[in-house]
Image (cartoon, rainbow, N blue to C red):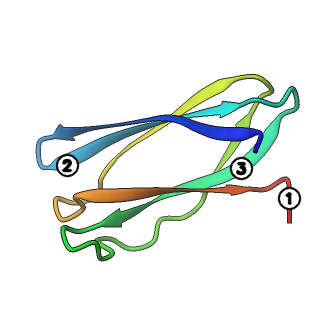
């Protein structure tokens, strides 16, 4: 894949999680994608309503960081979901 998750960082911010995800576009071409977080509780079940997809344009050969804070104290884990808009 042209776009890769290079690194994820997570830290406590009071009773919330602060997340940073580094994305790398290895292609010389710009890439359009969407992303969202899926929040999980301590049992691994969904802890919050499904987020909307957030559009992102990654320019060729660049690194980009997305960041967020968990929506509630019940969200103790997460999944980062990326959808490539360049392919069907």
Depth check: give the residue in front, 59 or 77: 77
Quadrant of the snapshot with the C terminus? bottom right
- N-terminal of the two: label 3 or label 1? 3
Q: Which residue is mark 3?
A: 33
Q: Which residue is mark 1?
A: 87
Looking at the image, which residue is at 83% across and 34% down? 30
Q: Residue 2, image x and y in percent?
A: 77, 39
Label 3 – label 1 distance at C-alpha: 10 Å
Q: Is residue 63 left or right of residue 28?
A: left
Q: Is residue 36 left or right of residue 55?
A: left
Badge 1 crowding class, 10 Å Cα cut-off, few under 14, some 14 to 19, many 20 or more, is few
Q: CA distance from mark 3 to mark 2?
A: 26 Å
Residue at disc 1, secondary structure: loop
Tag 3–tag 2 contact (CB < 8 Å): no
Q: Position of residue 29 (x, y in %)?
A: 88, 31
Numbered badge on residue 16: 2
Q: Can you name the residue that lies furthest to the front here?
A: 1
Q: Residue at x 32, y 71 (%)?
A: 48
- CA neighbours of label 2 inside 10 A, class few (<14), some (14 to 19), many (20+): some
């Amino acid at each position: 894949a042209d776009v890769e998750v290079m690194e994820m960082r997570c830290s406590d911010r009071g009773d919330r999680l602060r997340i940073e995800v580094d994305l790398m576009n290895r292609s010389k071409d710009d890439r359009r994608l969407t992303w969202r977080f899926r929040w999980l509780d301590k049992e691994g079940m969904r802890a919050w309503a499904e987020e909307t997809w957030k559009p992102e344009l990654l320019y060729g050969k660049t690194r980009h960081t997305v960041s967020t804070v968990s929506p509630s104290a019940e969200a103790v884990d997460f999944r980062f979901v990326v959808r490539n808009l360049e392919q069907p």
